[in-house]
Image (cartoon, rainbow, N blue to C red):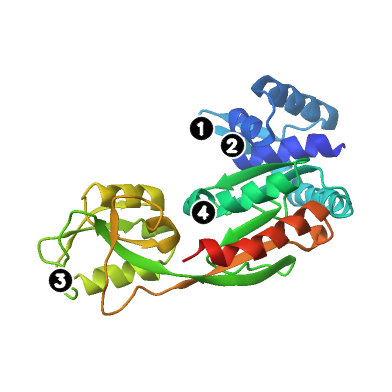
Amino acid sequence: MEWSDVRIFLAVARAGTLGGAARALRLSHPTIGRRLRSLEEATGQTLFQRTADGFVLTEEGSAIITLAEQMEEGALAMERRLAGQEQNLRGCLRISSADWFGAYVLPPIIAEYTNAYPGVDVEILTGTRLFSLAQRESDIAFRIVPFDTSDIVQRRLTRLNYGVYVAASAPDPVFGDGTGFRLVTHDTSTGQFPDIAWLTENFPNARPVMRSNNRNVQARMCREGVGIAVLPRAVGSQIPGLRLLGLPSEPPSRDIWMGYHRDLRHLQRLRAFITVVDNHLREVLP
């Protein structure tokens, strides 16, 4: 059985649809369907039950899923190890981060990097999903929580400071009260956000009116006068029309962590990028 066939089998098992597998592998829908049929014919087994809700593993498919994942890990490890030996500054560098980090912190870093190394193509992946370093979805990632696997080389870069903002023309809310004001908060279903907890505790009489999982959306809603928002200062300081409040205390800060897979530690385009990050990060995080 070829790795390319196993890759398609795993993609369909994870997505539950041919379309989802096609998007994950960047192949066409017909190609996925044709390759899956060929795999089942070659093995003489029906690996998926076709249902109205999508593709469900049969007993035969379930019996090999663990073996397929082991094969995947071996193939990915080989790919990472070979990539890590590349000595030329060419190819693609995939960077993942939160949306605000990609929009407000990375641009000057990427500008210097691409000017210095024009042979490297940069891809930035942002959002709430944590892209996998082991599966080469991303080569290097920036997060506000430490990485939780031993195969990741990681370090704390700096502390991320937060501030409380209102629209430039808005009056100052009373700290410890907030009566007459509204709050723009964060969707907390994806994790804990100490800054949001601090905001609601210190403006207890302000009414939460809107929440979003996107800091850029929060900032722009605040600028329009929707409510008080707590934001990374790297975001708030770059958006005209926002005013930073001078308060008796400040929201809790958080750490910024950088990580990459240990197999890529010798990849020259990655090492060069880390050098640029070290030179810039403290300048762009107020």
Mark 1 crowd level (few <14, some 14–19, many ≥20, 10 Å Cα): few
Q: Which residue is mark 3?
A: 174
Q: Amino acid at mark 1?
A: Asp
Disc nearer the start of the sequence (3/2): 2
Q: Nearer the viewer, mark 4 or mark 2?
A: 4
| Residue found at x 59% / y 33% | 20
Disc nearer the start of the sequence (1/4): 1
| Residue found at x 72% / y 62% | 275
Q: Nearer the viewer, residue 120 or 139?
A: 120
> The residue tagged with tag 4: helix, strand or loop?
loop
Q: Image quarter for residue 85? A: bottom right
Which mark is on residue 147?
Answer: none
Q: Position of residue 2 (x, y in %)?
A: 87, 36
Looking at the image, do the residues carrying marks 4 and 2 touch, with CB atoms under 8 Å apart? no
Q: Position of residue 240 (x, y in %)?
A: 33, 50
Looking at the image, do the residues carrying marks 4 and 3 touch, with CB atoms under 8 Å apart? no
Q: Amino acid at mark 2?
A: Gly
- The residues bearing labels 4 and 2 have C-alpha atoms spaced at a distance of 27 Å
- The residues bearing labels 1 and 4 have C-alpha atoms spaced at a distance of 32 Å
Looking at the image, do the residues carrying marks 1 and 2 touch, with CB atoms under 8 Å apart? yes
Q: Is residue 47 above or below residue 211?
A: above
> The residue tagged with tag 1: helix, strand or loop?
loop
Q: Which residue is mark 4?
A: 98
Q: Which residue is mark 1?
A: 53
Q: Nearer the viewer, residue 181 or 50?
A: 181
Q: Amino acid at mark 4?
A: Ala
Q: Which residue is mark 2?
A: 16
Q: Nearer the viewer, residue 278 or 192?
A: 278
- The residues bearing labels 3 and 2 have C-alpha atoms spaced at a distance of 52 Å
